[in-house]
Image (spheres, grey):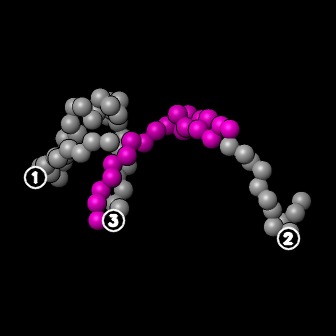
């Protein structure tokens, strides 16, 4: 993780530095979600649903059920 400083333009725009764009593989037209968190902003790239396929591979699906939820 790196720290960089950007400036907000009069149109409230920022430029993502080239090295960050390269590391994150951002392309022109990429969509970012901006989260407000603890008084700060956190831009996060939106990924298509297909890109998320398989991220939970290997996780156990065995869940201990409450007695009133037994099958």
From the top left corner, tell me how far across and down residue 7 is, in percent.
Answer: 13, 49
Q: Upstream in the sequence, badge 1 or badge 3?
A: 1
In the figure, residue 26 lies in which quadrant?
A: top left
Residue at 34% from the left image edge and 60% from the top image edge: 36
Q: Is residue 28 visible to us here?
A: no
Q: Residues within 10 Å of mark 2 (few under 14, many from 20)?
A: few
From the top left corner, tell me how far across and down residue 42 is, in percent.
Answer: 33, 52
Q: Left or right: 43 with respect to 13?
A: right
Q: CA distance from mark 2 to mark 3?
A: 39 Å
- Find out whether residue 46 is within the magenta segment: yes
Q: In terms of secondary structure, where does tag 2 sit?
A: helix
In the figure, residue 68 lies in which quadrant?
A: bottom right
Q: Which residue is mark 3?
A: 38
Classify 22 as above or below 58. above
Classify 59 as above or below 36. above
Q: CA distance from mark 1 to mark 2?
A: 59 Å
* Magenta extent: 38-58
Q: Upstream in the sequence, badge 2 or badge 3?
A: 3
Depth check: give the residue in front, 7 or 67: 67
Q: Which residue is mark 2?
A: 68
Q: Which residue is mark 1?
A: 10
Q: Which mark is residue 23?
A: none
Q: In terms of secondary structure, where does tag 1 sit?
A: loop
From the top left corner, tell me how far across and down residue 13 is, in percent.
Answer: 18, 48
- Find out whether residue 32 is within the magenta segment: no
Classify 68 as above or below 23. below
Q: In terms of secondary structure, where does tag 3 sit?
A: loop
Q: Left or right: 30 with respect to 60?
A: left
Residue at 35% from the left image edge and 62% from the top image edge: 37
In the figure, residue 24 lies in which quadrant?
A: top left
From the top left corner, tell me how far across and down residue 9 is, in percent.
Answer: 12, 49
């Amino acid at each position: 993780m790196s720290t960089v400083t950007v400036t907000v333009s009069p149109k409230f725009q920022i430029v993502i530095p080239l090295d960050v764009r390269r590391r994150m593989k951002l392309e022109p037209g990429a969509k970012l979600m901006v989260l407000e968190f603890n008084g700060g902003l956190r831009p996060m790239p939106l990924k298509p649903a297909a890109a998320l396929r398989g991220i939970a591979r290997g996780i156990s699906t065995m869940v201990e059920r409450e007695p009133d939820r037994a099958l």
